[in-house]
Every structure is written in structure tokens, then in C-alpha cells.
Image (cartoon, helix red, strand yellow):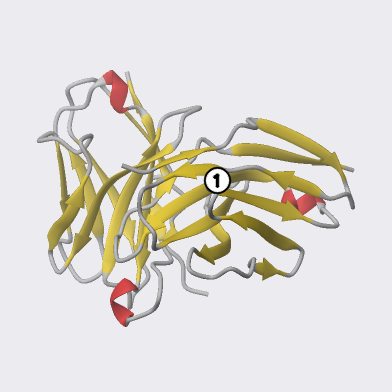
Amino acid sequence: AQTVTQSQPEMSVQEAETVTLSCTYDTSENNYYLFWYKQPPSRQMILVIRQEAYKQQNATENRFSVNFQKAAKSFSLKISDSQLGDTAMYFCAFESFGNEKLTFGTGTRLTIIP
Amino acid sequence: EPEVTQTPSHQVTQMGQEVILRCVPISNHLYFYWYRQILGQKVEFLVSFYNNEISEKSEIFDDQFSVERPDGSNFTLKIRSTKLEDSAMYFCASSDFDSGGPYNEQFFGPGTRLTVL
């Protein structure tokens, strides 16, 4: 069974600064996907960024990027130039290749301070 | 942009009562899911549904739970006899996994907060 661990329950950062959210996971599989989901106070989770395990290149989506270390089973999210709208709960999630279900971490509550 | 919707946003019920949580997935999606999030805990997978049958379920999804797609648009989760520990946020999700895409991007609804008294 897979597990996902997010060791930072809460974080806060000043607007325009950079913040990194940590995620580690445990799996015996070689092919899988990793995701970061954002859950704003309105509570609808939206996909921020994904990473295919077979790709060595780290995924980037505008101000969001990941640091994927497969050997270390680490998948951190970096948010650059943070904005007030980035305030949300962030969940790291794992999906086995060809599987359907997502396994989530416990989340990190990120607050951007004006 | 199409989105997953859920009703009601908040449901309060007495222990032992039956509840039905409703979801309208994105119209061209074929895979449907329920997850739950007990307050302060992680989001947990309950069940996935494809082609009018359960494709996978977790150990949480016992005989008290059932899912149904009663028509072409709704996807429901029924809890037959609610317990206090069923109090949680329940999220519906859908995906077009079957489209042959490389990964399964799931689109989530806003959730239904279930409170069992």
C-alpha cells in the first residue's frame, strides 16, 4: 500500500516570497504519478501540478514547480512570487499507473500574508 | 468551464438515519469517485465507479454504503444507517480516464458536509 506524508501542517509566508511545501511518499511501484491539489477556503480541490515518475525533468506550471527526487521518494512544491490567492490547503497525492484512486497526504495549510 | 457539482452543501442527520448525497459529474466523464475527509484528517478514497458498477472500493466502504448512477447525470452515495463517525466532508470526483490519456486527472466537487448527531 502507498502512503503519502506531509510533515508541515501549517505554513505562512509574506506575499511575493517563495515557499516550498514538502511531501514524501512510500511505494514499491516504479510507475506512478504525483499530484499537488489546492483546496481554497471554498473547498473545491483543483489540480495544481502533476509529475510522471518516469520523467526526470521536474514539472513546472507558471509560478508552481516541483522538486521530484525519485530515489528519495520526495515531491516538494515550490510556489514563487506567492499571491494572496494562493492561500489554501495543499494536498500531495499519489496515483499508481493504471489505477484509479488517489492516495492523499494530510495537507499543508498555507497562508499568504499581505 | 464544466465542473462537478454536489448537493446538498451541508446535511445534518440523526444517527441511524439514511442519507443520500448527490453529485453531478462532468458530462463526458466515465469514471466517478467518492472520497471523504474527516475534520482535520486526510482525504480518503471510498469508491470508484465505472460502467455502472463499482470498480474499486476501500475498507471504509462497507455494507452501509452504496453508490448508484440512477440516470445519465447523477451519481449518488447512500449511507444506510449513519453513525457518528460518518461525520465528514464527502467529495465526489469524476474523470475521463477512459479517454486514453496518460494519467487520471480527477475533477472534484465542492463537497457535502455531513453531520451526524
Give the vertical position of A44 relative to B61 (above or below). Answer: below
Of the pair B76 and A7, the residue shown nearer to us? A7
Is residue A2 in sight in this rendering? yes
Number of other residues with Cα within 10 Å of mark 1, as a class: few under 14, some 14 to 19, many 20 or more: many
In this image, A72 relative to B37: left or right?
A: right
- Residue in the picture at 74% in, 69% down: A62
In this image, B101 relative to B86: left or right?
A: right
- Chain bearing tag 1 is A
Which corner quadrant holds the N terminus of chain A?
top left
- Residue in the picture at 64% in, 66% down: A58
Amino acid of disc 1: Phe
- Residue in the picture at 52% in, 53% down: A45
Q: How many marks?
A: 1
As drawn, the residue found furthest toward the bottom would be B100
Quarter of the image for residue B16 reads top left
Give the vertical position of B111 relative to B105 (above or below). Answer: above
In this image, B112 relative to A34: left or right?
A: left
- Residue in the picture at 56% in, 38% down: A107
Where residue A99 sits in the image (x, y, percent)? Answer: 29, 61
Where residue B78 sits in the image (x, y, percent)? Answer: 19, 42
Is residue A41 in sight in this rendering? no
Where residue A75 sits in the image (x, y, percent)? Answer: 59, 51
Does dot 1 land on a helix, a strand or a loop?
Answer: strand
Quarter of the image for residue B28 reads bottom left
Where residue A36 sits in the image (x, y, percent)? Answer: 57, 54
Give the vertical position of B11 relative to A79 (above or below). Answer: above
Q: Which residue is mark 1?
A: A91
Of the pair A104 and A42, the residue shown nearer to us? A104
Which corner quadrant holds the C terminus of chain A?
top right
In this image, A13 relative to A102: left or right?
A: right
